[in-house]
Image (cartoon, rainbow, N blue to C red):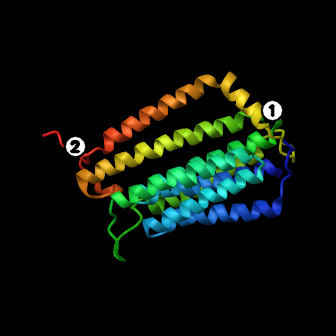
Amino acid sequence: MNAVEWYFVLAALLFCIGAYGVLARRNLIIVVMSLELMLNAVNLALVAVANFVPAAAGRGTLFVLFVITIAAAEVTVGLAIVIANYRNRRTVQADEYHEMKG
Amino acid sequence: MPGGDFHPVYFSIVAAWILVAGVGVVASRSVVRAAVSMVLCFLGVAFAFALMNSALLAIVQILIYVGAISVVIIFGIMLTETPAGPRHQFFNRQSVIAAPIVVATAVLVAVILVSGDLLTAGETAVNPGLRQLSSLLFNRYVLPFELVSLVLLAAMIGAIVLARREDRQ
């Protein structure tokens, strides 16, 4: 295995840790944190490609900059939704939102 | 900017740091502890960026993630309230099913990424300088750059509208 593949394995592991948090945690704020972990994993893989594959030099770094910007926007809107829901329901536990359950 | 080599020892340390902190986010019982683990994980990713010889991204990571996003999330923790106590359940009902699915996904993704021969990667990092990067950003990728500022504006307005206290009556 060469360098970029080690970073890919690290990114895959971090991505799946975050995915488990999104799937299994009840607290919506921890779900948002786990989403950030997943985005960080993708950034790690992108930087690995950008820095170890000569054909991708530069563009990967730019993509990571864009991903970081969108992640900042995403966490702001996500937490605003969590807080708006908290105001209505007094809870941030994901499985206590069940109004639309038939 | 000179290329950097792959350091197995440093990589192992940083990888262990990132993974332990990531597990700390997912597994910790208190939200504040999860937030601290998240900050540590972001720092670890910044170290990984620095290890890959991209100092710009390491600095951006520390500024945006360790600085801004962590503060936003800690504000979110302060504005909401989670019930504490030993009887409280931290994982939902699908957590048992989610674990094997996630492990299978990790193995699958890792195998696909490692076995793929689409990359002819060298052992040494090739890193574009800041000058090349900025000329790429402001010439070829200037449209995404402007669009992303629009997205940030929309997100800012949207967050204010969503989280505002409604006192219309």
Q: Is residue B49 visible?
A: yes
Which element carries disc 2, helix, strand or loop? loop
Q: Disc 2 or disc 1, which is closer to the eye?
A: 2
Q: Amino acid at mark 2?
A: Glu
Given the image, what chain letter belongs to the residue carrying mark 2? B
* Residue B76 horizontal/vertical position (percent): 39, 55
Name the amino acid, label 1.
Answer: Ala
User: Pointer 1: what residue?
Assistant: A55
Rendered-image quadrant of the C terminus of chain B: top left
Using residue B155 as the reference point, say whether residue A40 is left or right of it. right
In the image, residue B163 sits, relative to residue A23, either above or below, namely above
Snapshot quadrant of residue B132: top right
Q: Hey, which quadrant is residue A42 in on the image?
A: top right
Please report the residue visible at 82 percent of the width from the left and 52 percent of the height from the top. Answer: A1
Q: Is residue B56 left or right of residue B79?
A: right
Residue B106 percent location from the top left of the image: 63, 54
Q: Which residue is tagged 2?
A: B166
User: Which residue occupies 57% across, 64% down?
Assistant: B23
